[in-house]
Image: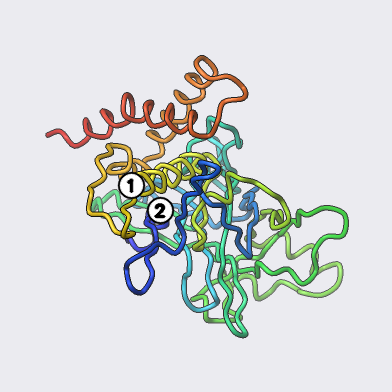
Amino acid sequence: IEEYQLWRALVPKMTESNLAFTDLYWRADTDKLYAQEVIHQKILTLKECVKIPRIKGDEVRVLDRCVRLCLCDGLEIVSNIHTVRAIVPSKLDPRELTEDWHFARNSLNTLIDEQPELLMRSNFSGPGQKLKLLIEISQWCQSTVTQEKCEIGCGWAMVSIDDVEPPLITDTKNYNELLRGGHTDQEGVLLDPQYKVFRSNGISGMIDRYKRARVKFSIESRENDVDVLYDNLPIQSTIAPMNAIKPMAFFRNELAFQFHKRHHPTGLSTTPIDSIFLGTFFQALPQADLIYTLNRIFRIRKDRYLSGSSSTQQQRELFIKVYEQFVYPLLQFRQLP
């Protein structure tokens, strides 16, 4: 659904009069995008999903395992929905009823749909409402008989972003959340009926807890950190992989710069923007392999042609040049018959 895709956050928001932008300002004095802080800014790191029920049988083939994440107010989704692909060991004991999911190593070369480290930003604030992180575990399957494909949910977890018990020593808090069954507005629905025999108190309860499906992750607070790259991102609620942050920031910088160049004395301008990068980047952002190619070639060209003291404008111009020379042809190649 387009409404919940990440590229939607790149569309600048207009005022009610449609005469100005509410979240996109170019500072001519510094030649930079006006940085905008947000209420919530945190780093989410997925670590592991354990004891996930296995789908067994010859009639169903598992195509992919994934974790879907979004920000919500408890009732409605307020951000994009981001999907992270998980991996399992190549060899599994056929007698096991559950399996553990792992994630790719986080690095500059990790594909954005496999990257376990994500940036969460939001300006959400509602009366009596708290911003929450919703995590859903699912498996994408296909019938070997009818070839029909479907998604099977394997549980969900929800935690509040506003932590009432923050860690004392570090800004990072680790979570080990039990996966629940049913709908998000239902309480007490177990993921598996066998959990009813598990105890919940004492040492026995602690042991039984490790027999149930769980998702492990950590959340690091970054509200007090000054990061120009993060502050160049949209102020609306988003969950974005770390390797997509710089391309998104360059896009918003270029868009604001082009609007500033076409500024009219009356404040209005009908001069069209002719930019391959601005016109097609929306199509490239959802494609993990294209963003990987873009980031990798940009790093190589940056080390070769730019100095360590290069300005943001120089980096942005090189980035756009790399996109138009290498990524744009690949994007159009896929659309050929």
Of 105 and 289, nearer the camera is: 289
User: Would residue 256 be found to the left or right of residue 48 on screen?
Assistant: left
Of 91 and 19, nearer the camera is: 19
Disc 2 versus disc 1: distance between alpha carbons?
A: 8 Å
The three-letter code of the residue at mark 1 reads: Phe
- Number of numbered markers: 2
Location of mark 1 (residue): 282
Q: What number is the disc on residue 10?
A: 2
The x and y percentages for residue 162 are: 69, 69
Q: What number is the disc on residue 319?
A: none
Q: Is residue 85 above or below residue 321?
A: below
Q: Residues within 10 Å of mark 1 (few under 14, many from 20)?
A: some
The three-letter code of the residue at mark 2 reads: Leu
The x and y percentages for residue 25 are: 47, 54
Of 174 and 332, nearer the camera is: 332
The x and y percentages for residue 256 are: 41, 48
Question: CB of mark 2 within 8 Å of CB of mark 1?
Answer: yes
Please report the residue visible at 60 percent of the width from the left and 62 percent of the height from the top. 38
Quadrant in the picture for the N terminus? bottom left
Q: Residue furthest left?
A: 337
